Image (cartoon, rainbow, N blue to C red):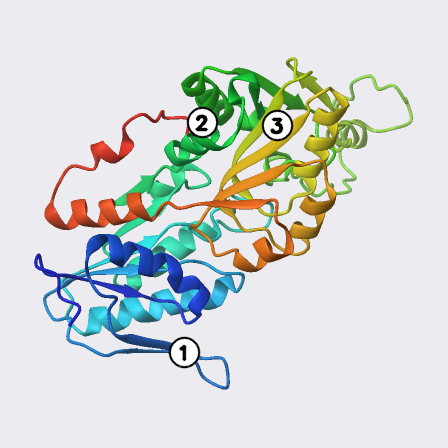
Amino acid sequence: MNVAKSGYRVFSANSTAACTELAKKITERLGVELGKSVVFQEPNRETRVDVKESVRGQTIFIIQTIPRDVNTAIMELLIMAYALKTSCAKNIIGVIPYFPYSKQCKMRKRGSIVCKLLASMLAKAGLTHIITMDLHQKEIQGFFSFPVDNLRASPFLIQYIQEEIPDYRNAIIVAKSPAAAKRAQSYAERLRLGLAVIHGEAQCAESDMADGRHSPPCVRNTTGHTGLELPCKNAHVGLTQCFFGFIMMAKEKPPITVVGDVGGRIAIIVDDIIDDVGDFVAAAEILKERGAYKIYIMATHGLLSADAPRLIEESAIDEVVVTNTVPHEVQKLQCPKIKTVDVSMILAEAIRRIHNGESMAYLFRNITVDD
């Protein structure tokens, strides 16, 4: 049976074999067997979960990696948590290395904060605690009504830089946008390297998306007194039309520039998620033009959607290094430039410490708030 000496059990909530690799590595490090359960899809695409052993009064850890089919993975997690809850499990702790919908954590015009909705659904399904890694925004932890341990992958990525990049002392850490400068600075300080920032982007950044705060109200035609009209450049244009026309002018991006000297250096771009690689490819081209002779991308979560492997293979990027929080074996077969760093050790240690009631501070040593 999957009963450890200390009385906890570990299950995988995923129905695909590729996504259970991380769960197997974690249980091997813990010295326990993976829980006996069956997760599968009915012919009509409904998710079914069957737990094959008693969990009454036990602390349960559910490991769920998120493949490309994000919504199916979420339903698998919710249904398994609810099945364990109704089977009288004492505590249900979700181990979700990459938290889905984390980019939808801000209000957009006529939109919603989907990340908070997901947090509420997980609580309703029965989860009492979550272990995750490198949330897109740290403020996401405030969406939950239960504890969240947001682990960091930076020590593993920094170790990779030190051990696998020849002559890394001649490298410079690059932020692909001013918004990523704090993370890049954190890496640069610990590696004692220089820092460069790419300013001006070919594509709209996430921070540029309309959030509804500047939505103009409807202009109503009135026949009464129009009030005082201030001078306008075009005298025949009314104040309202002039004012709102000025507000609604398109925001122009400055030309792309690199703040910092990258000539004759190894450029290492750091970020938390690499999904649509268009901005990374554009950044690599700019760095090549400025004289960087090697370009590395370091990110925690390698989603690498759509034709990302092909774009990376054809680009000036020399290597993309991501962790195994998200399965990407297919992408690695398509692009040899993609390398993987294993983070199962810190996830297994987090499970052990939480169950034994030990402090989690040890897992956050040698990191900064800006990671």
Numbered label attached to residue 40 = 1
Total residue callouts:
3
Foreground: disc 1 or disc 3: 1
- Give the class, few, some or many, for how many residues have Cα within 10 Å of label 2's Cα (few <14, many ≥20): some
Residue shown at the point (41%, 40%) measured from the top left: 134
Residue shown at the point (23%, 45%) measured from the top left: 349
Amino acid type at image mark 1? Phe
Residue 26 image-quadrant placement: bottom left
Q: Secondary structure at mark 1?
A: strand
Foreground: disc 2 or disc 1: 2
Q: Does residue 144 show up? A: no
Query: Which residue in the protein does label 2 denote?
Result: 162
Amino acid type at image mark 2? Gln
Q: Earlier in the sequence, mark 1 or mark 3?
A: 1
Q: In which quadrant is the C terminus drawn? A: top left
Please indicate whether residue 101 sits to the left or right of residue 79 in the image. right
Please indicate whether residue 90 sits to the left or right of residue 195 in the image. left
Query: Which residue in the protein does label 3 denote?
Result: 177
Q: Is residue 73 above or below residue 49?
A: above
Q: Secondary structure at mark 2?
A: helix
Q: Is residue 12 above or below residue 218?
A: below
Seen from the viewer's position, the closer of residues 270 and 117 is 270
Q: Earlier in the sequence, mark 2 or mark 1?
A: 1
- Give the class, few, some or many, for how many residues have Cα within 10 Å of label 1's Cα (few <14, many ≥20): some
Residue shown at the point (39%, 67%) measured from the top left: 14
Whole-percent x, y for residue 90 in the image: 13, 62
Please indicate whether residue 351 sits to the left or right of residue 294 in the image. left
